[in-house]
Protein backbone atom coordinates (compact mmCIF):
# COMPACT_ATOMS: atom_id res chain seq x y z
CA UNK A 1 0.00 0.00 0.00
CA UNK A 2 1.48 3.33 -1.04
CA UNK A 3 1.94 6.08 1.59
CA UNK A 4 0.65 9.62 1.00
CA UNK A 5 3.35 12.12 -0.07
CA UNK A 6 3.06 14.07 3.21
CA UNK A 7 3.75 10.94 5.27
CA UNK A 8 6.69 10.11 3.01
CA UNK A 9 8.18 13.58 3.55
CA UNK A 10 7.73 13.37 7.30
CA UNK A 11 9.43 9.96 7.33
CA UNK A 12 12.36 11.24 5.30
CA UNK A 13 12.73 14.29 7.54
CA UNK A 14 12.61 12.14 10.66
CA UNK A 15 15.27 9.81 9.26
CA UNK A 16 17.47 12.77 8.31
CA UNK A 17 17.00 14.26 11.79
CA UNK A 18 18.02 10.96 13.44
CA UNK A 19 21.06 10.78 11.14
CA UNK A 20 22.12 14.34 11.99
CA UNK A 21 21.76 13.61 15.72
CA UNK A 22 23.88 10.47 15.34
CA UNK A 23 26.59 12.32 13.43
CA UNK A 24 26.64 15.19 15.95
CA UNK A 25 26.79 12.72 18.85
CA UNK A 26 29.63 10.84 17.21
CA UNK A 27 31.56 14.04 16.55
CA UNK A 28 31.01 15.22 20.12
CA UNK A 29 32.12 11.85 21.46
CA UNK A 30 35.21 11.86 19.25
CA UNK A 31 35.99 15.46 20.25
CA UNK A 32 35.45 14.67 23.93
CA UNK A 33 37.67 11.59 23.65
CA UNK A 34 40.37 13.61 21.93
CA UNK A 35 40.07 16.41 24.50
CA UNK A 36 40.30 13.82 27.29
CA UNK A 37 43.52 12.47 25.78
CA UNK A 38 44.99 15.98 25.70
CA UNK A 39 43.69 16.73 29.18
CA UNK A 40 45.29 13.56 30.53
CA UNK A 41 48.63 15.39 30.47
CA UNK A 42 49.38 18.52 32.47
CA UNK A 43 52.49 20.23 31.14
CA UNK A 44 54.03 19.42 27.77
CA UNK A 45 57.67 20.47 27.80
CA UNK A 46 60.44 20.06 25.22
CA UNK A 47 64.13 20.83 24.85
CA UNK A 48 65.02 21.33 21.18
CA UNK A 49 68.66 21.63 20.09
CA UNK A 50 69.99 22.48 16.64
CA UNK A 51 73.65 23.15 15.82
CA UNK A 52 74.94 24.11 12.39
CA UNK A 53 77.97 26.17 13.39
CA UNK A 54 80.64 24.42 15.45
CA UNK A 55 83.19 27.25 15.07
CA UNK A 56 85.49 25.03 13.06
CA UNK A 57 85.89 22.35 15.73
CA UNK A 58 83.52 20.06 13.80
CA UNK A 59 82.34 20.30 10.18
CA UNK A 60 79.47 22.76 9.75
CA UNK A 61 76.00 21.37 9.11
CA UNK A 62 73.39 22.98 6.87
CA UNK A 63 70.02 21.86 8.18
CA UNK A 64 70.22 21.27 11.93
CA UNK A 65 69.05 24.79 12.87
CA UNK A 66 66.26 24.73 10.27
CA UNK A 67 65.19 21.33 11.60
CA UNK A 68 65.13 22.58 15.19
CA UNK A 69 63.05 25.63 14.32
CA UNK A 70 60.55 23.57 12.39
CA UNK A 71 60.29 20.98 15.18
CA UNK A 72 59.78 23.82 17.67
CA UNK A 73 56.93 25.27 15.59
CA UNK A 74 55.26 21.89 15.42
CA UNK A 75 55.61 21.21 19.14
CA UNK A 76 54.27 24.66 20.06
CA UNK A 77 51.21 23.95 17.91
CA UNK A 78 50.78 20.80 20.01
CA UNK A 79 50.77 22.86 23.22
CA UNK A 80 54.39 22.39 24.26
CA UNK A 81 56.53 24.89 26.09
CA UNK A 82 59.86 24.71 24.28
CA UNK A 83 63.39 25.62 25.33
CA UNK A 84 65.14 26.18 21.98
CA UNK A 85 68.95 26.06 21.96
CA UNK A 86 70.66 26.98 18.68
CA UNK A 87 74.34 27.07 17.71
CA UNK A 88 76.34 28.97 20.36
CA UNK A 89 73.53 28.67 22.93
CA UNK A 90 73.61 24.88 22.68
CA UNK A 91 76.56 24.24 25.00
CA UNK A 92 76.99 21.21 27.22
CA UNK A 93 76.19 23.34 30.25
CA UNK A 94 73.00 24.82 28.80
CA UNK A 95 71.70 21.42 27.65
CA UNK A 96 72.30 19.78 31.04
CA UNK A 97 70.87 22.82 32.84
CA UNK A 98 67.70 22.53 30.77
CA UNK A 99 67.44 18.85 31.66
CA UNK A 100 67.89 19.63 35.35
CA UNK A 101 65.22 22.34 35.21
CA UNK A 102 62.82 19.87 33.60
CA UNK A 103 63.56 17.31 36.33
CA UNK A 104 62.82 19.95 39.00
CA UNK A 105 59.56 21.22 37.55
CA UNK A 106 57.80 18.37 35.75
CA UNK A 107 55.53 15.93 37.56
CA UNK A 108 53.64 12.68 37.16
CA UNK A 109 50.95 14.12 34.85
CA UNK A 110 53.45 15.72 32.48
CA UNK A 111 55.36 14.68 29.39
CA UNK A 112 58.78 15.57 28.08
CA UNK A 113 60.42 15.54 24.64
CA UNK A 114 64.10 16.03 23.81
CA UNK A 115 65.14 16.70 20.21
CA UNK A 116 68.79 16.97 19.21
CA UNK A 117 70.06 17.89 15.75
CA UNK A 118 73.83 18.04 15.40
CA UNK A 119 76.95 15.93 15.38
CA UNK A 120 77.27 12.66 17.28
CA UNK A 121 80.33 10.65 18.21
CA UNK A 122 81.01 7.06 19.25
CA UNK A 123 83.94 5.85 21.28
CA UNK A 124 84.89 2.21 21.70
CA UNK A 125 86.47 1.09 24.96
CA UNK A 126 87.18 -2.64 25.10
CA UNK A 127 84.07 -4.40 23.86
CA UNK A 128 81.72 -1.54 24.69
CA UNK A 129 80.56 1.30 22.46
CA UNK A 130 79.81 4.67 24.06
CA UNK A 131 77.76 7.24 22.20
CA UNK A 132 77.92 11.02 22.61
CA UNK A 133 76.01 14.08 21.47
CA UNK A 134 78.36 16.88 20.41
CA UNK A 135 77.23 20.26 21.77
CA UNK A 136 78.63 23.61 20.70
CA UNK A 137 82.12 24.19 22.09
CA UNK A 138 83.04 20.51 22.47
CA UNK A 139 86.59 19.75 21.34
CA UNK A 140 86.88 16.31 22.95
CA UNK A 141 85.00 13.64 24.89
CA UNK A 142 85.03 15.76 28.05
CA UNK A 143 82.97 18.48 26.38
CA UNK A 144 80.33 16.12 24.97
CA UNK A 145 77.07 14.84 26.43
CA UNK A 146 77.28 11.07 26.85
CA UNK A 147 74.31 8.82 26.28
CA UNK A 148 74.83 7.56 29.82
CA UNK A 149 74.24 11.14 31.00
CA UNK A 150 71.09 11.40 28.90
CA UNK A 151 69.82 8.16 30.44
CA UNK A 152 70.69 9.52 33.89
CA UNK A 153 68.70 12.68 33.16
CA UNK A 154 65.80 10.53 32.04
CA UNK A 155 66.05 8.66 35.34
CA UNK A 156 65.99 11.93 37.30
CA UNK A 157 62.60 12.57 35.68
CA UNK A 158 61.32 9.19 36.86
CA UNK A 159 57.98 10.67 37.90
CA UNK A 160 57.34 12.22 34.46
CA UNK A 161 54.81 9.97 32.78
CA UNK A 162 55.93 10.15 29.15
CA UNK A 163 59.38 10.84 27.73
CA UNK A 164 60.49 10.82 24.10
CA UNK A 165 64.03 11.34 22.80
CA UNK A 166 64.40 12.17 19.10
CA UNK A 167 68.06 12.16 18.08
CA UNK A 168 68.97 13.36 14.61
CA UNK A 169 72.68 12.74 14.96
CA UNK A 170 75.29 10.21 14.01
CA UNK A 171 75.39 7.22 16.38
CA UNK A 172 72.18 8.32 18.14
CA UNK A 173 71.05 4.70 18.28
CA UNK A 174 73.41 4.01 21.18
CA UNK A 175 71.04 5.77 23.62
CA UNK A 176 68.80 2.82 24.47
CA UNK A 177 67.78 -0.72 23.79
CA UNK A 178 64.97 -2.50 22.05
CA UNK A 179 64.67 -4.93 24.94
CA UNK A 180 61.11 -4.82 26.27
CA UNK A 181 60.11 -2.18 23.72
CA UNK A 182 57.26 -4.21 22.25
CA UNK A 183 53.89 -3.05 23.57
CA UNK A 184 51.99 -5.30 25.96
CA UNK A 185 48.73 -3.47 25.24
CA UNK A 186 46.69 -4.97 22.40
CA UNK A 187 45.74 -2.32 19.85
CA UNK A 188 42.21 -3.68 19.46
CA UNK A 189 41.37 -3.06 23.12
CA UNK A 190 38.54 -0.52 23.51
CA UNK A 191 40.62 1.31 26.14
CA UNK A 192 43.88 1.11 24.16
CA UNK A 193 44.49 4.89 24.14
CA UNK A 194 43.69 5.19 27.84
CA UNK A 195 46.10 2.36 28.63
CA UNK A 196 49.03 3.70 26.61
CA UNK A 197 48.63 7.27 27.87
CA UNK A 198 48.35 6.26 31.53
CA UNK A 199 51.35 3.91 31.56
CA UNK A 200 54.86 5.34 31.75
CA UNK A 201 56.70 5.68 28.42
CA UNK A 202 60.47 6.04 27.94
CA UNK A 203 61.05 5.86 24.20
CA UNK A 204 63.52 7.04 21.60
CA UNK A 205 63.78 7.49 17.86
CA UNK A 206 67.26 7.92 16.37
CA UNK A 207 68.33 8.75 12.82
CA UNK A 208 71.14 6.20 12.81
CA UNK A 209 72.74 3.43 14.79
CA UNK A 210 76.28 3.00 16.10
CA UNK A 211 78.98 3.69 13.50
CA UNK A 212 76.43 5.23 11.12
CA UNK A 213 76.56 8.75 9.80
CA UNK A 214 73.24 10.41 8.98
CA UNK A 215 72.28 12.56 6.02
CA UNK A 216 72.31 16.32 6.58
CA UNK A 217 70.50 17.27 3.37
CA UNK A 218 67.06 15.97 2.49
CA UNK A 219 63.62 16.86 1.09
CA UNK A 220 61.79 20.10 1.86
CA UNK A 221 64.81 22.08 3.04
CA UNK A 222 65.25 19.82 6.06
CA UNK A 223 67.43 16.87 6.93
CA UNK A 224 66.29 13.50 5.63
CA UNK A 225 65.24 12.17 9.04
CA UNK A 226 63.47 15.31 10.31
CA UNK A 227 61.50 15.74 7.10
CA UNK A 228 59.96 12.29 7.50
CA UNK A 229 59.56 12.68 11.27
CA UNK A 230 57.42 15.78 10.67
CA UNK A 231 55.63 14.16 7.78
CA UNK A 232 54.69 11.36 10.16
CA UNK A 233 53.50 13.40 13.14
CA UNK A 234 52.77 16.91 11.87
CA UNK A 235 51.12 15.98 8.59
CA UNK A 236 49.52 12.91 10.16
CA UNK A 237 50.89 10.52 7.55
CA UNK A 238 51.63 8.00 10.31
CA UNK A 239 47.99 7.95 11.47
CA UNK A 240 47.51 4.53 9.96
CA UNK A 241 44.17 3.76 11.62
CA UNK A 242 42.62 7.17 10.90
CA UNK A 243 41.76 8.09 14.50
CA UNK A 244 43.72 11.39 14.27
CA UNK A 245 46.12 10.24 16.98
CA UNK A 246 49.66 9.21 16.01
CA UNK A 247 51.00 6.68 18.49
CA UNK A 248 54.66 5.76 18.85
CA UNK A 249 54.18 2.37 17.12
CA UNK A 250 52.51 4.13 14.19
CA UNK A 251 55.31 6.69 14.01
CA UNK A 252 57.86 3.89 14.20
CA UNK A 253 56.14 1.82 11.50
CA UNK A 254 55.88 4.80 9.14
CA UNK A 255 59.15 6.62 9.78
CA UNK A 256 61.71 3.84 9.99
CA UNK A 257 61.21 2.39 6.52
CA UNK A 258 60.55 5.82 5.00
CA UNK A 259 63.75 7.44 6.32
CA UNK A 260 65.98 4.41 5.76
CA UNK A 261 68.44 4.45 2.88
CA UNK A 262 71.90 3.20 1.97
CA UNK A 263 73.54 5.70 4.37
CA UNK A 264 71.38 5.59 7.48
CA UNK A 265 68.97 3.17 9.08
CA UNK A 266 66.89 4.85 11.81
CA UNK A 267 66.15 2.86 14.93
CA UNK A 268 63.85 3.12 17.91
CA UNK A 269 63.31 1.53 21.27
CA UNK A 270 62.99 2.05 24.99
CA UNK A 271 64.98 3.39 27.92
CA UNK A 272 65.05 2.16 31.53
CA UNK A 273 61.75 2.83 33.28
CA UNK A 274 59.60 2.13 30.23
CA UNK A 275 56.30 0.61 31.38
CA UNK A 276 54.67 0.00 27.98
CA UNK A 277 53.03 3.37 27.59
CA UNK A 278 53.21 4.94 24.13
CA UNK A 279 54.07 8.53 23.28
CA UNK A 280 51.33 10.16 21.19
CA UNK A 281 50.76 13.21 18.99
CA UNK A 282 47.45 14.79 18.01
CA UNK A 283 47.21 14.62 14.21
CA UNK A 284 43.99 16.70 14.16
CA UNK A 285 45.87 19.90 15.03
CA UNK A 286 46.67 21.93 11.94
CA UNK A 287 49.94 23.85 11.68
CA UNK A 288 49.57 27.64 11.97
CA UNK A 289 49.98 29.57 8.74
CA UNK A 290 53.62 30.13 7.89
CA UNK A 291 54.83 26.90 9.44
CA UNK A 292 54.08 24.55 6.59
CA UNK A 293 56.71 22.43 4.91
CA UNK A 294 59.00 24.35 2.62
CA UNK A 295 58.80 27.70 4.51
CA UNK A 296 62.56 28.32 4.52
CA UNK A 297 64.55 29.05 1.40
CA UNK A 298 67.65 26.86 1.43
CA UNK A 299 70.04 25.47 -1.16
CA UNK A 300 68.74 22.39 -2.93
CA UNK A 301 70.16 19.23 -1.34
CA UNK A 302 72.07 16.72 -3.42
CA UNK A 303 70.02 13.84 -4.86
CA UNK A 304 69.18 11.24 -2.24
CA UNK A 305 68.14 7.59 -2.48
CA UNK A 306 64.43 7.26 -3.29
CA UNK A 307 62.15 6.30 -0.42
CA UNK A 308 59.76 3.35 -0.78
CA UNK A 309 56.41 4.06 -2.40
CA UNK A 310 53.64 5.08 0.01
CA UNK A 311 51.52 2.04 -0.87
CA UNK A 312 54.41 -0.26 -0.03
CA UNK A 313 55.06 1.68 3.19
CA UNK A 314 51.55 1.00 4.40
CA UNK A 315 51.98 -2.68 3.59
CA UNK A 316 55.20 -2.66 5.62
CA UNK A 317 53.61 -0.73 8.47
CA UNK A 318 50.84 -3.27 8.96
CA UNK A 319 53.38 -6.00 9.78
CA UNK A 320 56.28 -3.88 10.97
CA UNK A 321 56.22 -5.14 14.55
CA UNK A 322 55.51 -8.73 13.56
CA UNK A 323 58.34 -8.96 11.03
CA UNK A 324 60.85 -8.16 13.80
CA UNK A 325 59.39 -10.46 16.44
CA UNK A 326 61.41 -13.60 15.54
CA UNK A 327 64.60 -11.64 16.24
CA UNK A 328 63.36 -10.37 19.61
CA UNK A 329 62.13 -13.84 20.56
CA UNK A 330 65.47 -15.33 19.57
CA UNK A 331 67.29 -13.16 22.12
CA UNK A 332 64.63 -14.00 24.73
CA UNK A 333 65.16 -17.72 24.02
CA UNK A 334 68.89 -17.27 24.62
CA UNK A 335 68.22 -15.80 28.08
CA UNK A 336 65.66 -18.50 28.89
CA UNK A 337 67.92 -21.24 27.43
CA UNK A 338 64.77 -22.53 25.76
CA UNK A 339 65.79 -24.64 22.76
CA UNK A 340 62.20 -25.10 21.57
CA UNK A 341 61.51 -21.36 21.57
CA UNK A 342 64.85 -20.79 19.83
CA UNK A 343 64.11 -23.31 17.07
CA UNK A 344 60.57 -21.96 16.58
CA UNK A 345 61.89 -18.63 15.26
CA UNK A 346 63.55 -20.17 12.20
CA UNK A 347 62.15 -21.36 8.91
CA UNK A 348 62.95 -25.05 8.26
CA UNK A 349 64.78 -23.85 5.14
CA UNK A 350 66.75 -21.14 6.97
CA UNK A 351 70.51 -20.76 6.61
CA UNK A 352 73.12 -19.18 8.87
CA UNK A 353 76.29 -17.75 7.35
CA UNK A 354 79.38 -17.41 9.56
CA UNK A 355 82.34 -16.39 7.45
CA UNK A 356 82.69 -19.01 4.71
CA UNK A 357 80.57 -21.53 6.65
CA UNK A 358 76.96 -22.17 5.71
CA UNK A 359 74.72 -23.89 8.25
CA UNK A 360 71.33 -25.41 7.63
CA UNK A 361 68.38 -25.16 10.02
CA UNK A 362 69.22 -28.61 11.40
CA UNK A 363 72.84 -27.56 11.99
CA UNK A 364 71.74 -24.36 13.75
CA UNK A 365 69.42 -26.17 16.14
CA UNK A 366 71.85 -29.02 16.83
CA UNK A 367 74.63 -26.59 17.76
CA UNK A 368 72.34 -24.80 20.21
CA UNK A 369 71.04 -28.10 21.60
CA UNK A 370 74.64 -29.07 22.42
CA UNK A 371 75.50 -25.64 23.85
CA UNK A 372 72.48 -24.83 26.04
CA UNK A 373 73.00 -27.70 28.57
CA UNK A 374 76.55 -26.45 29.20
CA UNK A 375 75.34 -22.98 30.20
CA UNK A 376 74.23 -21.87 33.65
CA UNK A 377 72.84 -18.68 32.21
CA UNK A 378 72.96 -16.12 29.41
CA UNK A 379 72.62 -12.37 29.85
CA UNK A 380 71.70 -10.24 26.85
CA UNK A 381 73.21 -7.01 28.12
CA UNK A 382 72.22 -4.98 25.07
CA UNK A 383 70.85 -5.52 21.62
CA UNK A 384 69.41 -3.33 18.90
CA UNK A 385 67.77 -4.01 15.58
CA UNK A 386 67.71 -1.70 12.54
CA UNK A 387 65.34 -1.98 9.61
CA UNK A 388 67.25 -2.18 6.32
CA UNK A 389 64.60 -2.76 3.69
CA UNK A 390 61.69 -4.75 2.35
CA UNK A 391 61.81 -6.40 -1.05
CA UNK A 392 60.13 -9.46 -2.59
CA UNK A 393 58.21 -10.03 0.68
CA UNK A 394 61.47 -10.28 2.65
CA UNK A 395 62.31 -7.87 5.50
CA UNK A 396 65.99 -7.18 6.18
CA UNK A 397 67.46 -6.05 9.49
CA UNK A 398 70.86 -5.23 10.96
CA UNK A 399 71.48 -6.07 14.60
CA UNK A 400 74.16 -5.62 17.24
CA UNK A 401 74.43 -7.23 20.65
CA UNK A 402 76.44 -7.53 23.85
CA UNK A 403 75.95 -10.93 25.52
CA UNK A 404 77.51 -12.74 28.47
CA UNK A 405 77.60 -16.56 28.54
CA UNK A 406 77.97 -18.13 32.00
CA UNK A 407 79.17 -21.73 31.72
CA UNK A 408 78.53 -24.34 34.40
CA UNK A 409 82.28 -24.95 34.66
CA UNK A 410 82.78 -21.35 35.82
CA UNK A 411 83.89 -19.78 32.55
CA UNK A 412 82.38 -16.47 31.45
CA UNK A 413 82.51 -15.54 27.76
CA UNK A 414 81.41 -12.14 26.52
CA UNK A 415 80.57 -11.27 22.92
CA UNK A 416 79.92 -7.92 21.23
CA UNK A 417 79.00 -8.53 17.63
CA UNK A 418 77.07 -7.40 14.59
CA UNK A 419 74.79 -9.55 12.47
CA UNK A 420 72.02 -9.36 9.88
CA UNK A 421 68.64 -11.07 9.62
CA UNK A 422 66.12 -11.67 6.87
CA UNK A 423 62.56 -12.59 7.83
CA UNK A 424 59.58 -13.69 5.77
CA UNK A 425 55.94 -14.48 6.46
CA UNK A 426 55.38 -18.20 6.01
CA UNK A 427 51.93 -19.71 6.62
CA UNK A 428 50.89 -16.59 8.52
CA UNK A 429 54.00 -16.36 10.74
CA UNK A 430 57.12 -14.26 10.33
CA UNK A 431 60.23 -16.47 10.56
CA UNK A 432 63.97 -16.01 10.14
CA UNK A 433 65.12 -17.28 6.75
CA UNK A 434 68.74 -16.07 6.89
CA UNK A 435 71.24 -14.93 9.51
CA UNK A 436 74.77 -13.62 8.90
CA UNK A 437 76.64 -13.62 12.19
CA UNK A 438 79.98 -12.33 13.48
CA UNK A 439 80.27 -9.38 11.09
CA UNK A 440 82.20 -7.01 13.35
Image (cartoon, grey):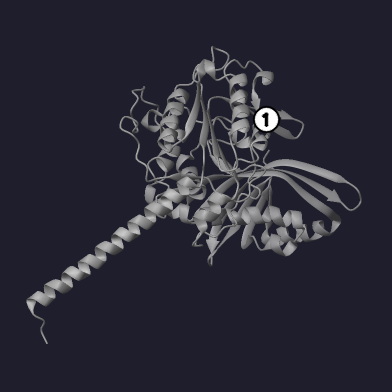
Q: Residue at x 64, y 60 (%)?
A: 345
Q: Position of residue 339 (x, y in %)?
A: 74, 62
Q: Residue sitting at 43 percent across and 33 percent down? A: 76
Query: Depth check: 112 or 227 in front?
Result: 112
Q: Quadrant of the N terminus?
A: bottom left
Residue at the bottom extreme?
Answer: 1
> Is residue 123 shown above or below 242?
above
Left or right: where does residue 104 sit relative to residue 81?
Answer: right
Quick one: SS at disc 1?
helix
The answer to whether residue 411 is seen in the rendering is: yes
User: Does 223 sit left or right of 6 as displayed?
Assistant: right
Q: Residues within 10 Å of mark 1 (few under 14, many from 20)?
A: some
Front-most of 285 and 323?
285
Q: Residue at x 84, y 54 (%)?
A: 375
Compared with 65, 46 (above or below) is: below
- Can you tell which quarter of the image residue 94 is in? top right
* Left or right: residue 239 compared with residue 199: left
Residue furthest to the top in view is: 55
Q: Quadrant of the C terminus?
A: top right
* Residue nearest the viewer, comparing 41 with 72: 41
Q: In the picture shown, does residue 316 fall above or below 235?
A: below
Residue at 76% over, 57% down: 336
Please state the horizontal and vertical placement of residue 118, each as a whole percent of the image.
Answer: 53, 25
Where 364 sits versus 401, above or below?
below
Any part of residue 392 in sight: no
Residue 427 is situated, as x and y percent measured from the top left of the image, at 53, 67
Q: Count of labels shown?
A: 1
Identify residue for label 1: 149
Q: Which percent across, then down, holds residue 6?
A: 9, 75
Figure quadrant of residue 73: top left
Amino acid sequence: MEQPEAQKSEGVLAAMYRLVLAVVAALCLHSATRDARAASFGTNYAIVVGIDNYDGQWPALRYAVADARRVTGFLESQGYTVTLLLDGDATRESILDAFRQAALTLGENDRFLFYFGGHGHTDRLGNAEHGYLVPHGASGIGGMVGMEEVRTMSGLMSNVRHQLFVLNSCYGGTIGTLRGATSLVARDRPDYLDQITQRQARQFMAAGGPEQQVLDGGPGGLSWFTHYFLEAVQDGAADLDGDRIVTFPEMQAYLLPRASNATQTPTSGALPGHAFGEYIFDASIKQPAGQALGLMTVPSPPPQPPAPEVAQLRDIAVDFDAMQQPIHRLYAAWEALDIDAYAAQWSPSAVQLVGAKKRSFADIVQRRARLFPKLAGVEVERYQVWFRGFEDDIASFDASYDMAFYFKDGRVVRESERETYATRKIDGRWLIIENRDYLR
